[in-house]
Amino acid sequence: MRSRHALSSAGFARAIESGGRYRKGGGAPLRAMTGSPYLKTTYPSDAALLGTPVRRFWLAVFGLAALGFPLVGTPVLMDLLCRTAVAVVGAHALNLVTGYAGQVSLGHAGLMAAGAFTAGILSEELGAPFWLALPAAVLVGALFGVVVGIPSLRLRGLYLALSTLALHFVILYLASEYQSGRGFATGLLVPRPKVGPWTLAGATAWYYALGGVATLTTLFCLNLARTRPGRAWMAIRDRDVAAASMGVNVAAWKVLAFVVSSALTAFGGGLWAYYLGFVSVEAFSFFLTVEYIAMVVIGGLGSVLGAILGATFVTVLPYAVDAIVNLVPVPDRVHTHLFAVKFAAFGLLMAVFLILEPRGLVSVWSRVRTYFDLWPFRYHPLKG
Amino acid sequence: MQLLANTLALASIYILLAVGYVVVYRASRVLNLAHGELMMLAGYAFFGLVSATPGHPLWAVPAALVVSFLAGVGVYATLVRPMAGHPLFSAVLVTVSLGILLRGLVLLGWTADILYPLAVTGYKNVPWPLPGGAVLTTIDLLSILMAVTVLLALWGFFARSRLGIQMRAAAENPLLAAQRGVNIHLVFSLSWGISTFVAGVAAVLYASKVRLDPEIGVIGLRAFPVALVGGLDSLAGVAPAGLAIALLENLAIRYVSPLLSDVVPFLALLVMLFVRPWGLFGTKEEIERV
């Protein structure tokens, strides 16, 4: 699970990728004269999220486009974006523990179920409002995070993954016992979130709410990644013995990675329950875990941008298959078994990415950017 | 008595499937999470062949097993071999995506309808009363027989045959084995073939006994705790682990709830991981401890 981003800041890695030389105390790097945006001379500028005017410009454009989207969006597109926003939250959570801390988790769907069911049960049994039920879901997620985190102190790699998988089945069992025991055979209805007289309903309101939550989660993860927790997790991922010898408390940080990730996952599950207005065990099969793993792997492990790209890719994929099948003449059989086609396409793409592009969409993106950086050259010019 | 008889029948299917995990894991250190789906594929191959050759059901079984064997070799050659040098977890994920792909293709080819291959063959699954008042069907007895045969055959193969010894050598240290003239790619693809071949046996038996639909791959996922409880790299551990888990599962069905029985293998797995993560008979060094 080692990625190439061994260095803590994306800016630093980019300086190397794009051919800028970084020497400590040595002669002035080549690009210093030209004022290259990739050259960082201070730590704050290295850690800055929006280091260059170009980035600020494009982010502003993107933000305005996102804010104005409801004016032109169709209901289907709005729903798709809301689903993507929830997926982004879940993918960030998985990316924290698997991408940054390097601890493989196969219990993601179980933890989402824990969050969704906590929210569902609290509002069903006690009539709890969402501003109580959602934090409670986060709390339950954090508790499960401790439970998953403890095996990670003894086990590594495959065996750890299996213990999280077992936890997934245990959580689902508890949820289905509750569902069948209380007589909600098909699932629980979750009321719309409500504050005072104001109810969260309608596509536009949900779009802004979930978009805002996804943005805040992204910011949270970016900040985690570039501060002490992120650095500690990456150090553990790359070599736990080395991390320990540099003063990182491996056990504590590992458990914390699981706690933060599980809490965020459960939060995502709770959001999902509120957005759909419905919770049922069937929605949280092992396949959901695979989907989330596919998101972080296809996007690029250990990258916040990767989690967003992967979540978007995996969420949009079934809709894209729909669109392609409608545009291209295909045999009738494909139309009647569209579900199977989506399933197969997902499996195929995941395998293709793992074999051909193991660093994910982020590496494709960085190659494209390097291409334009260097244009019209294919390689950076030789020094001197 | 019936409880014991059921346990034996269930355990024999678990053993046949768990053997597949162990053989592949020993050779390539890859946990094949597509094992259940490969088993499902063998089941559909069996059904297709039985339907295509009416009147000769006994030819369809070996033919389905050959297809199954070739599927395993093909998976190794196309998917697992290119993953050499990548992180192990990526290889495991590739098998997961293979499983999803296979499921999609089977749904596309055969739809999700439930099929009964035994009805097509024209044979009947006759119940036999056993001493002690228990009842087992022909296929139950056959699967117990097959489980014992497979275990003995594999033990003989690994202990005595030249190829089996080469396989053990390649599992222990691929580099050294290759330098001593072992064709490790032959040996690895053979181990994948053996694994899916045995899964094919399980598929034919299970599909004849119960049913055939795209969901039978799930039993493959439930058999892997058996492999792990026995020890992922230990063939000897499969039999006791299979019996123990099948017994626990049957007890859960009888005394607690059928819902619980689905989780029992994973609860056993969780307990085992906390207490003795390398399994009943596995090698302790196998585990990456922290």
Image (tube, coloured by chain):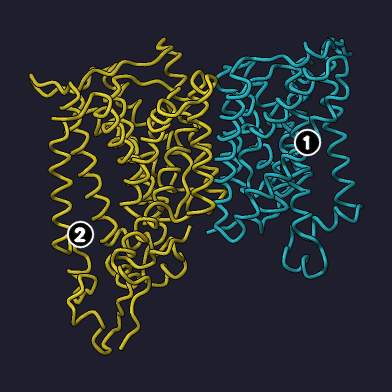
What residue is shown at x 75% (from left), y 50% (from top)? B189
User: Which hue belongs to chain B?
Assistant: cyan
The percent coordinates of residue A206 (x first, y second) are 19, 28
Chain (yellow) = A
Name the image quarter holding residue B119: top right
Give left or right: position of A274 versus A106. Answer: left
Horizontally, residue B185 falls left or right of residue A316, namely: right
Above or below, A323 relative to B96: above
| Chain letter belonging to callout 2 | A
Tell me where residue A131 sits by quadrant: top left
The residue that appears at 69% across and 42% down in the rendered structure is B21
Left or right placement of residue B238 versus residue B221 in this view: right
- On the question of residue A278 being in view, the answer is yes
Placement of B28 over or under B133, stated as above or below: below
Q: Is residue A100 visible?
A: no
Q: Which mark is residue A49?
A: 2
Image mark 1: chain: B
Q: What is the C-alpha distance between the residues marked 2 and 1?
A: 54 Å
Q: Position of residue A165 (x, y in %)?
A: 52, 39
Residue positioned 13% across, 50% down in the render:
A60
Q: Amino acid at mark 2?
A: Leu
Q: Amino acid at mark 1?
A: Val
Residue for badge 1: B198
Which residue is drawn at the image coordinates 83% and 58% (left, top)?
Answer: B166
